[in-house]
Amino acid sequence: MSFCKRNPQNKKMNLSEFISSKLRNAWIEERNIKVYVRKSIRLFGKEMYQCLDLATAEVDEDKKGRGIFTKFLKQFDQEAKKLNRAVFLESILEPRLLEFFLKNGYKYVPGTTDLAPNMYKIVA
């Protein structure tokens, strides 16, 4: 039995549609990027936060390096702020992104692994 709402029809949706839906997780598609996102509740330190999770991001191969992910992340942060949610980045596998996230206000989740760290940002 599942306690979270999923996207059973795998209907294509964008970030705004996901935010306004009752879905807990979904693949969303924006121009040149496909992202797996979730609405969750997480513990950072001693406090619980409602979060928007970014679990996987796939930029079209021929569009990489053009700021598409940066633009999406900015929009993701803004949506989280409107909803009074933190942003959670799950299992960052690309080492070059770590410095980018740190420069953009993200912090390591305590106890995270060095091989695929998790990061978060309180945007509320």
Image: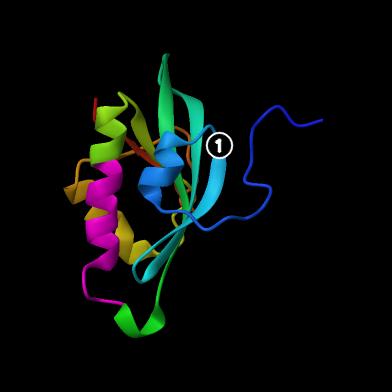
**Residue 53, image x, y percentages:** 45, 41
How many marks on residues? 1
Furthest residue toward bottom: 62
Q: In front here: 8 or 25?
A: 8
- Magenta residues: mostly which secondary structure? helix
| Residue type at numbered disc 1 | Leu
Question: Quick one: quadrant of the C terminus?
Answer: top left
Seen from the viewer's position, the closer of residues 102 and 76 is: 76
For image coordinates 42% across by 35% down, the residue present is 20
Question: Residue 51 in the image: x percent, y percent?
Answer: 42, 30
Can residue 65 be seen here?
Answer: yes
Q: Is residue 105 magenta?
A: no
Q: Position of residue 88 (x, y in %)?
A: 40, 39
Give SS at disc 1.
loop
Q: Is residue 118 visible?
A: no
Mark 1 surroundings: few (<14), some (14-19) or many (≥20) residues within 10 A: some
Query: Residue at 56% across / 35% down in the picture?
Result: 24
Relative to 15, is 51 above or below?
above
Q: Quadrant of residue 4?
A: top right
- Residue at image x 32%, y 27%? 83
Residue lying at the far right of the rendered structure: 1
Question: In the rendering, at what x and y percent does residue 30 appear?
Answer: 37, 62
Q: Which residues are magenta?
A: 64-77
Q: Nearer the viewer, residue 43 or 77?
A: 77
Q: Residue at x 21, y 68 (%)?
A: 67
Pick out the residue farthest to the top: 46
Q: Is residue 25 left or right of residue 68?
A: right
The residue indicated by pointer 1 is: 23
